[in-house]
Image (tube, rainbow, N blue to C red):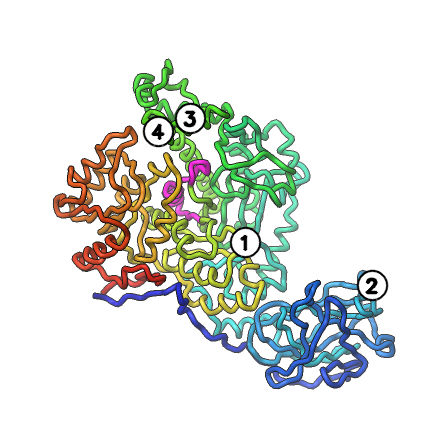
Amino acid sequence: MGKIQTMRTNTFFFGISIIAALAPTPILAAASPAAVFAPSASDGLELVSVPDGRWEKTSIAGREAVGNVAGGEPAITYLYFRLEPGARSKAGGVVYAVVDYLDSGMGVARTQYNSSASAYSDGPRILMLGSGKWERAVLKFTDARLSGTQNGGADLRINGPPDLRLSRLEIYFEDPKIKLPDDTERIRMHLKTSPKPRGMFYTFGNDADAASAQLYHALGVTSIESYVTWETVEGKKEGEWDWSRWDEQVRVLKEHDLKWVPFLILGPAYSTPDWFRESSEHYGCRCLEHGTPSKVESLWNPNLPKRIDRFVAAFAERYGRSGVIESVLLGIQGDFGEAIYSVWGGGWTFDIPGEYHNHAGFWCDDPYALASFRKFVAARYKNAQSLNKAWGSSYAAAAEADFPGRGDDLKEFRERVGTGDPLARRRWLDFVDWYRECMTDWSDWWMAATRKHFPKTPIYLCTGGDAIPEHGSNFAEQCRVAAKHGAGVRITNEASDYGLNFSITRWVASAGKHYGAYFGFEPAGAEDEKGIAARIYNATASGANQLHDYNPNVVSSESRIAAQRRNLPWLFHVANPVVPVALWYPNVALTLKWGGYLQKAAEFRDFIDFDYVDESMLRTGALDRNRLLVVLHGDVMEPSDARLIAAWVRKGGRLLVTGVPRFESVEGTGEPEEILFGGSPNGRTIGKGKVARLDGLPALAVELQAAMDAEGLPHLDIAKDGVFWTQIATAS
């Protein structure tokens, strides 16, 4: 048995020490300071105490120092410095400050000073790289008009991380000519010994200025994401393009050796200019539940494709050869840009367009969508007789088919589906299949259009949610069409719990590996220190090639930065993780009755690593890469899919079922049960393979371990113990 490499997320054995960055060599200034502050001896410069700037003395790393008092209301975040009147009167328009600070963590300390424009003009910043040593910075303030107009009569304040400590501050009215490594040199030295991702795109959102760009680079980030909407570049009127905002972002990223991930968004309400939404070309989604339109564009709007192509073409002409683009992310629909329909929106999505009708529902109550649905039904059923038999309807022609209902009628229809009515179940599945297929086709079109303008650039489709019917997403199919265009999928639904992250991202990971589409993960919002480690583990163990995070999740506290630094060595691309076990993703059953599956998948992940296989993947041979198939959920199965599983078992596969006492078809027959179990409810042998029905997860774990041993498959513990393991190297 070959060696197994593992990573364990319960104890996070991802440790790494933070290695010191370049330490300064004390150098005497060419001039004498006009004023000096030190904790025990000051001359002409005072550290004042005000409500948002109370301070205390301390002794740390061999020096006396000062820092903010912890806690307080309002938050205490500033150190205020006030020149004595005699010193202040000698100041000119340019002032220098030499600061000795403890480089104890990673972050940016910012300064504000009296200028002719404001009492709080932004000044230079101090980049902290976590060397753990005393460092020195020289800050230059231009247009200085020191007049004591800040809180407490101060002229200058420094806003740093909570643990910022200063041992000395000197004020000069001429250049002290102290030569120190600049931040770029410091970062280069830091990166030589600091952890960084290997073969993985590591992206922070959103946008970066000069100060934050340097910090992100020092944290191992490879690229910065920006929400490049149509509205941001042609917002005033048609034909009046303004790229200044993104020109500046590109300049900053190039200057600090970072790449760019433009999130090209056209479809969500906030992404379209006012002039377009006020024109006859705008056609908003309309929901079946209320018949109320949204400001989100309908993906059936016939005017939309030409506008999208025009926008992407203009962007590509401007930046396609800039050399700064790492990948392009596509925001095609919904409230935020994911490849799902409108779900909830609100908050900042209302800032540009104003409020609009939004909720989880079915956004297809328009003539263009209905025409699409009728075409789909006619292709599936060919004639009215077969359609009416399947649905219990009485249409004169298949092309006259309508949606299952609107308003209260739709609600009543869904209640019929829940009772197990076979005619209602089949009609509902057909409707949701169409709704999802439309989103898949829209994704396909978007990626084809973008690939035309970016022939060699990595392209990711942004998707999200959990694939409930209202979202209209089929993650496996989105990966399939991405692979057609040499593209990938980024799913945006993680948080801090590893098991739930796994359960909600693994469909994309499994389908991406099956079809040959690359993929990446993004959080849906905030995460904690544990989440930082869990997300790094999930990306590597899944075989992702991109990990996105929102910068506050990492840089908002020293403990989060420390967690990121400890775990970043584990962020690397694994071309093909070894995953011999598959878990059935019962898309048909979940479409009929949503709920329960993801929780079971998360619990089962504690026992063993696995990939998902859904019906569409099964039909394209996905089980060929697995030796074992586990079913935990979903009692409704198409007989044709049961036959494919039985054929796989016949060739030597092993099917293990628990939690599903009996399978039935959509029409309520026992045909799938008969195909798989043949009247032997506890299991049987089919050809070279076996099927077994087991009583609960403990029994499943025992059988699974025996099956893996019999198949000669390597594994660690198969037990519920809070330890997650993944084989990331092929056995040899």
Q: How many neighbours does mark 2 have within 10 angstroms: few (below 14), some (14-19), or many (20 or more)?
A: some
Q: How many neighbours does mark 4 have within 10 angstroms: few (below 14), some (14-19), or many (20 or more)?
A: many
User: Residue 505 lies in magenta, yes or no?
Assistant: no
Earlier in the chain: of badge 3 and badge 2, it is 2
Which type of secondary structure does the marked residue at label 4 adopt?
helix
Q: Where is residue 186 in the image (x, y as percent from the top left)?
A: 57, 74
Tags 1 and 4 touching, CB below 8 Å: no
Residue type, numbered disc 3: Phe
Residue for point 80% across, 66% down: 150
Q: What stretch is highlighted in magenta?
A: 468-490
Q: Please name whichever residue, 58 or 611, is drawn nearer the observer in this view of the structure.
A: 58
Q: Position of residue 727 (x, y in %)?
A: 30, 61
User: Residue 480 lies in magenta, yes or no?
Assistant: yes
Residue type, numbered disc 1: Glu
Tags 3 and 4 touching, CB below 8 Å: no
Q: Mark 2 points at which residue?
A: 116
Q: Is residue 494 left or right of residue 732?
A: right
Q: In this view, does 431 lie to the left or right of 221?
A: left
Answer above or below: position of 105 versus 74: below
Residue type, numbered disc 2: Ser
Which type of secondary structure does the marked residue at label 2 adopt?
loop
Instruction: State the image quarter where residue 162 is shown.
Output: bottom right
Q: How many neighbours does mark 1 have within 10 angstroms: few (below 14), some (14-19), or many (20 or more)?
A: many
Q: Name the residue under label 4.
A: 425
Q: Mark 1 points at which residue?
A: 225
